[in-house]
Image (cartoon, rainbow, N blue to C red):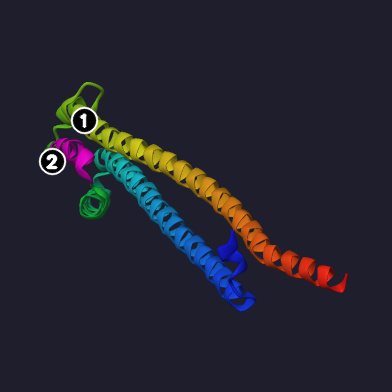
Amino acid sequence: MIWVDSISVGNKRVISGLAMLGLFVMMFGMGQLTFKGLVAQSTSLSDRLVSAEQVSAMERCLIQAGGNIYAYGSSPLDRRATEQRITAYLAEFESRQSEYEAVYLEAEGKTADKDLQKAYLGYKAGLVKLLRQIDKGDLRGALAASANGGALEKAQAAVLEGLGRLQAVNRLAVKSLEDGQRVEYKSAVIMGFGLFLLACALLLAIVSFFSRGMWKVLARSHVRAG
């Protein structure tokens, strides 16, 4: 390559420096894109894990509200305080559900959330009705509603089923995000290895670029000295 020999050493240094700089810029850009992708994946995964915890908390509120029914019927003097506890658990359930809908709900969970709302309203109405039955002294009717197979027990089961469907959506989303993270990480490793090989090839090309002219200069010097 005669044109290579005609380039001065100073220009060769400039060309080599620009080539290395270009490679470093490309490596930095690729690294930034990969880093942003991993951060986005981690953020989405974190949100999904939080949403799963929200659903679990809603389930706990539902169970705790139902768990106070016996105390309400067996302790007439404490009924006011017990009903306040039940109301607080239901209010927390509703608050968490509203937050879930506002922050975490996505398209694939809308049907499950709609069914959950319907089931919860039915359960809440049945629970209030049961408490009023107890107030009127209809303990037999209240017991029948809250027993296995009773109206309130069925309503609670429907809410738990709705929560289970939401949690299933979360599990699928978490699995998808985890798979995406693994793919992203694998791509980053392959890309890094490819850039390393490119850097090695460029370094060898630069060495060859410089050494070609140097060997010719040394050869000419040797001939002249001879």
Mark 1 Cα-neighbour bin, 10 Å: few <14, some 14–19, many ≥20: some
Name the side, left or right, on which 144 lies relative to 163. Answer: left
Magenta region includes residue 74:
no
State which quadrant residue 1 falls in. bottom right
Q: Residue at x 32, y 37 (%)?
A: 167
Residue that protrudes farthest toward the right in the picture: 226
The image position of residue 53, as x and y in percent, is 37, 47
Viewer can see residue 135: no
**Is residue 115 or residue 121 the one in the foreground?**
115
Viewer can see residue 176: yes
Mark 2 Cα-neighbour bin, 10 Å: few <14, some 14–19, many ≥20: few
What label sits on residue 158 in the rendered view?
1
The image position of residue 86, as x and y in percent, is 25, 48
The image position of residue 103, as x and y in percent, is 25, 55
How far separated are the C-alphas under marks 1 and 2? 11 Å
Residue 92 sits above or below residue 5 on the image: above
- The span shown in magenta is 106-121
Name the side, left or right, on which 11 lies relative to 73. Answer: right
Q: Secondary structure at mark 1?
A: helix
Report the amino acid beneath label 2.
Leu
Residue 193 sits above or below residue 163 on the image: below
Q: Main secondary structure of the magenta part?
A: helix
Q: Secondary structure at mark 2?
A: helix
The image position of residue 140, as x and y in percent, is 18, 27
